Amino acid sequence: MKNKIFKISIAASLFIGTGLINVACNTDNLEDVKNLGAFDTNNFFRNEQECFFALVGTYDPLRKYAGGFENMVTFFNAGSDDFYAGGGSSTDGAGIQGLSNYQLNPNTMPASYWRDYYQGISRANVLIEKIPAADMSDAVKNRFTGEAKTLRALYYFELVRMFGNIPLILKEIKATDDYYNIPQAPKAAVYAQIEADLLAAIPGLPMTVSGDQKGRLTQGAAKALLGKVYLFDNKKAEAAAQFADVNGTPGGTNQYGYKLVSDFASLWITDNKFTTESIIEVMHTNKGNSDWSFWGQGNDEGNSTNIMVAPRGYSKKTADAPDVVAGWAFNAITTDLFNFMQGDPRMNATILNVKALKEQNKADYSPAYMDSGYFLNKYMPTKDEVTTLPGPAELNYRQNYIYLRLADTYLMEAEALNGAGSRAQALLDAVRARVGLASVPVSMQAIKDERRRELVGEGHRWFDLVRWGDAPAKLGSRGFVAGKNEILPIPYTELTGTILKQNPNY
């Protein structure tokens, strides 16, 4: 049986996710079709409510960053010089172990990193096509279209960063279409489409959101994402222009209401959602009652990073020890990063030194694979965050994941300015001043160092090293091979029966 690029039918693609489950049960919108599981999109998208349900489903793949075992954060942390894969053993998760030691191959590359984003793209494509005929105001049409195009752009951005040349699909794929012979597009064409989508999306998006609208995309979010895309596409002047609009006066409050929070550690408090520093934030909740039967399949809503990074067998012995939940010990922090962070005010908010707690007889834990005794504190779960609602506690942590925040865009703008000039200096200074650090002369190396300290464990370091061309030097001892490991192997299951070509040297 041939494999399809879209493993899940349009029906399942549209209706997976908590936001759309109730709609899926409404048989008024379904009719008999020849292909089992197919969904007639002509009987949906008729009005604002139906389009909104579909839009919610288009947002769902954002939880790929921190949801499920195969999430972006722990996966790409493991491939960087700041973390080992960790976990219970060298076979605990073939994908995460394979990226960490650069033995990843088409058979061990988890297919979800390809499939989940194409599922999101499929949902966006259908929504973008159907919105014009829906019964709703032009303003709402423009907003929904802008959100769908921004999400499509983000999903394609992740795919092109991971896999390089990928199929570029911009329309609804129907049962009668040829799934098997969709060619890969050059990276330049994919980047061009991403940039075009974001430029088209921005005018229809609101400047700001509030109340129950928080979490939805805004003009500032789309512009910040566009700046990041331009930076990865080596269009530094264009990137700097977008970032300048988003960032405003370094250290101040800009037109979108963004401002660095005064306390760095407060960013990682679970209840401190949607701060002034947050630009794109992915929502997680324990109210979805996520369970093992559907964990990581697109409709669970908990943050899995929390349990994954917590130390195994942890128990506190003294009242002043952190009340941490015992977890799975993935993303053990390297001694190199621990040493690099010495003297930095962000140290304690970033790294939990369980090794020291054990030496002081304040706590105990069970050293796991590649243990260093240092754990990622930003996403560390504590006992007070354990859910009392139905569903396994491990799968129902509710800390949001911030994909883009202002300190990140400050440093990206400084990089886009080639690490030189008064504005680049002011941007770097603002990030350092927030944590009480004195100014240092701006340079590309100073920006790289600041990004490493500021953004530890947030899933950006591996992509930074690849973008800068520093990955072979920093990761060569792990097995990173220049000209190969800058992109990942396309999962074998996605190649079978198609005209897709595997990436070089895999």
Image (spheres, rainbow, N blue to C red):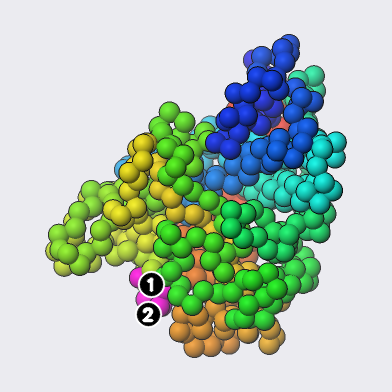
* Left or right: residue 217 compared with residue 18: right
Q: Amino acid at mark 1?
A: Met
Q: Secondary structure at mark 1?
A: helix
Is residue 475 depicted above or below 9 in this figure? below
Give the x, y percent position of residue 373.
28, 59
Give the x, y percent position of residue 204.
79, 55
Give the x, y percent position of residue 45.
76, 33
Dots 2, 1 in contact, CB < 8 A: yes
What label does residue 37 carry, if any?
A: none
Q: Secondary structure at mark 2?
A: loop
What label does residue 343 carry, if any?
A: 2
Residue bearing mark 1: 347
* Between 266 and 492, the one nearer to me in the picture: 266
Q: Residue at x 30, y 55 (%)?
A: 384
Q: Residue at x 39, y 51 (%)?
A: 306
* Left or right: residue 91 compared with residue 166: left
* Between 336 and 48, the one nearer to me in the picture: 48
Q: Is residue 167 magenta?
A: no
* Between 401 and 273, the one nearer to me in the picture: 273
* Image quarter in which the N terminus is found: top right
Mark 2 residue crowding within 10 angstroms, few (<14) / some (14–19) / many (20+): few
Range shown magenta: 341-348
Mark 1 residue crowding within 10 angstroms, few (<14) / some (14–19) / many (20+): some
Q: Which image quadrant is residue 344 in?
A: bottom left
